[in-house]
Amino acid sequence: MNAISAVKSNVCHKCDKSFGRRYNLRRHIENVHAEEEIKVEDLDVDNSEPDFKKRRFEDSEIENCRTESTQDEDEDFDEDYSKSETEVKDDKLSDEDELFEDSEIENCEAESLKNDDEDFEEGYSESETEAEGDEFSDKDESFEDSEIDNYEAESSQNERKDFEEGYSEFETEVEDDELSDEDESSSELEDNVAYQDWLEDAKDATEEMWSEKYEKYVNGCMGEDQANEKANRKTLWAVKRCFFNNYKDFLSSYLHLKDNDTHQEIVEDLEEKINKGTEVNTALNRIMPKHQPKFDGLFQDLEED
């Protein structure tokens, strides 16, 4: 039997047994025919020279078969290892992509849940506000309002006493036509420019306080109109205080100016121009430069310094 054909067909050259793989053929030769090879080596060289040559040729073929089988197995192993390594890398990249996608999904879900919670809380807050009116905000402000009331009571105690005394005196002098007189007085006050200016100054002085309360009420899910009305109500005491402080300053100054000759001359000139149809601001701009030199003595100390 040809040894080369036997090797190619995976057939044992000693027992003509065929195998499906070269690896199985090699193991068969090593295990089954190993003892026969040992016995052949023990024979006399002269008597077994043809067998020795044949065996050497066969061993060479077997060695070639082993080498070729080993190379094929190494190539198969390298190829399988390369494929396995590539698959591992692909799986690793795929796992990383999946982890990244899962992370993004979790972040998206967390953000969505957060937004849902915020929407729910906002809707719940609006519903609660609509159901209870401004009860919630009143409770939140109870402490603040209490502090304001205490501060107002402490700082305005003397003012209130004086006001009550003046009001009591006014009450004793009221006659039967009190209501009609009050209506006329109220109308005169509302149309008076000086009072309106002092009122605007008082509003400007308390604007920061009013804005804080307005923002607080609006952020508490209160309507703009309702928040505006409540902010006005909560800051009314401060506006009144500023208004009457301005009025008191004017009266205090007026008491010192009404009998002053320079002041009387300025007032007379001003009234004369207004009676001729000149606007108040225009008349003041024309009169004051005329009387300014009279006040030089007032600024003399500053000029010397």
Image (cartoon, grey):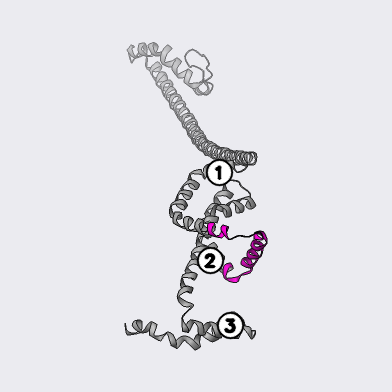
Q: Nearer the viewer, residue 22 or 273?
A: 273
The residue identified by callout 3 is: 271
As for residue 56 lying within the magenta part, the answer is no
Which corner quadrant of the image does residue 176 belong to?
bottom right
The residue identified by callout 2 is: 201
- Mark 1 against mark 3, which lies toward the viewer? 3
Q: CA distance from mark 2 to mark 1?
A: 28 Å
The magenta span reads 168-195
Q: Nearer the viewer, residue 55 or 115?
A: 115
Q: Residue at x 40, y 17 (%)?
A: 50
Residue 106 in picture, x, y percent from top left: 54, 37
Q: Residues within 10 Å of mark 3 (few under 14, many from 20)?
A: some
Residue 185 in picture, x, y percent from top left: 63, 65
Q: Earlier in the sequence, mark 1 or mark 3?
A: 1
What is the three-letter code of the residue carrying label 3? Glu
Residue 219 in picture, x, y percent from top left: 57, 48
Q: CA distance from mark 1 to mark 3?
A: 52 Å
Looking at the image, is 208 positioned above or below residue 277?
A: above
Q: Residue at x 47, y 73 (%)?
A: 255
Q: Earlier in the sequence, mark 2 or mark 3?
A: 2
Looking at the image, is 132 positioned above or below residue 173?
A: above
Q: Nearer the viewer, residue 284 or 61?
A: 284
Looking at the image, is 218 positioned above or below residue 243?
A: above
Q: From the viewer's perspective, is 188 left or right of 304?
A: right
Q: Mark on residue 162?
A: none
The residue identified by callout 1 is: 138
On the rendered image, what quadrant is the C terminus found in? bottom left
As for residue 192 lying within the magenta part, the answer is yes
- Mark 2 against mark 3, which lies toward the viewer? 3
Q: What SS does tag 3 mark?
A: helix
